[in-house]
Amino acid sequence: MTPKKIVVTGIGATSPLGGTAPDSWAALLAGESGAHTLAHEWVAQYDLPVTFAAEAKVRPEDVLERVEYKRLDPSSQFALISAREAWADAGAPDVDPIRVGVDYSTGIGGLWTLLDAWDTLREKGPRRVLPMTIPMLMPNAAAAAISMAIPSRAFARTDVSACASSTEAIANAYDHLQSGLADIVLAGGTEAVVHPLPIASFAAMQALSKRNDSPSTASRPYDSTRDGFVLGEGAGTIVLETEEHALARGARIYAELAGGSVTSDSYHITAPDPEGSAAARAMLAALEQAGAKTTDVVHINAHATSTPVGDIAEYNAMLRVFGDHLPNIAVSATKASTGHLLGGTGALEAIFTILALHHRTAPPTINLTEQDPEIPLDVVTSPRALGDGPLLALSNSFGFGGHNSVAAFRSY
């Protein structure tokens, strides 16, 4: 069968840079950082070694109805906010719910609900544990909340594959649209774990930057002085549909989702394969699905977490794939501005990739003052025009457990 063309007709995001996708994009282009010193009492209470993070700029309680806010974990709150924005941006299509699906993701899920319930159980006993605890903490809660709000009755599926989760959800949405399971799919991911336990845990494994004196410059992908990532939170959602369906209803089209892929390192539970072989296969598979050559790629939104090991491993993977063409690719590392949203990061970066193609502008990588000589990429440090004609871009996501996922987008 001839593959269907899958297009993006709506985007929504709530992030450390802004409460909407347009606001997040504008702040990204302006070179802003979403990282700041945390004002919560628990930072001092637990004497945390890292005292900053990239919290969502707009708080869910300022957006959602009170009953929604009370019945959803923060991860689901962010997901619902971004999904509603994306659906409205797509024109709130009048579609039979049985032809609308949800492919959503998270890396950890309802952590705040789980740990708050545990504190309540220990301090006040079982009768004080909220009846909604399980529906709020389950990883599929975000997908369920979105499916009920839209509504969506084709399917509501959840991916949990660490920091590759939401890019994998987008790749799955591509497959589900190709196979005819739905006419429209909302795809994306969410995370809300700016909490003392994850901060302490990531810090214990030397994954977080410790630049407590300068949070806004702490995330510095590809810089020789990088020392770890900045924990972020938020969600991103895109509306995908077949081109035929989108044109029939007169939808505005941002870009084409040309392909998506998933591979596994089978190497180490946290460290990436330093040779980048499986990550390279993921990029090649996405390009094959897109019917594209490596020389077609003009832009990559890299995973680039700002860890000493991870940035080099991804560079090795890109070098395997692109070889002599790699210096011609404009590489953006947007976690420098947003921090790392874990299970939500791929969706947010997919949105940035889509907008880069739509506006023909690669977003900047901030905080790069001394580029690591072992990573000689063409890193975009100020907004850069991507030129005329057809454009192809990749959005890379790699996660603990050796999960790799890549989405390929084409200008429309």
Image (cartoon, rainbow, N blue to C red):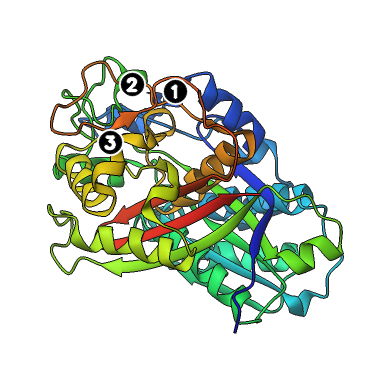
Work out which residue is located at the far bottom of the displayed protein and give it. 1
Q: Which mark is residue 33?
A: 1
* Upstream in sequence: badge 3 or badge 1: 1
Q: Is residue 272 above or below residue 28?
A: below
Image mark for residue 215: 2
The answer to whether 50 appears left or right of 374 in the picture is right
User: Separation of disc 3 and disc 1 at Cα?
Assistant: 13 Å
Q: Position of residue 308 (x, y in %)?
A: 15, 36
- For residue 281, side relative to residue 91 (left or right): left
Q: Which residue is at the front of the view, 302 or 327? A: 327
Task: Name the residue beneath numbered marker 3.
Answer: 229
User: Which element type, helix, strand or loop, lies under badge 3?
Assistant: loop
Residue 110 visible at all: no
Q: Amino acid at mark 3?
A: Phe
Labelled pair 3, 1 in contact (Cβ < 8 Å)? no
In the image, 112: left or right of 303?
Answer: right
Q: Earlier in the sequence, mark 2 or mark 1?
A: 1
306 vs 410: above or below: above
Q: In the rendering, which numbered label is found on residue 126?
A: none
Residue 253: x and y, percent?
72, 51
Alpha carbons under labels 2 and 3: distance apart: 11 Å
Which of the two residues, 152 or 293, is positioned nearer the viewer here?
293
Q: Secondary structure at mark 2?
A: helix
The quadrant of the image that shows the N terminus is: bottom right
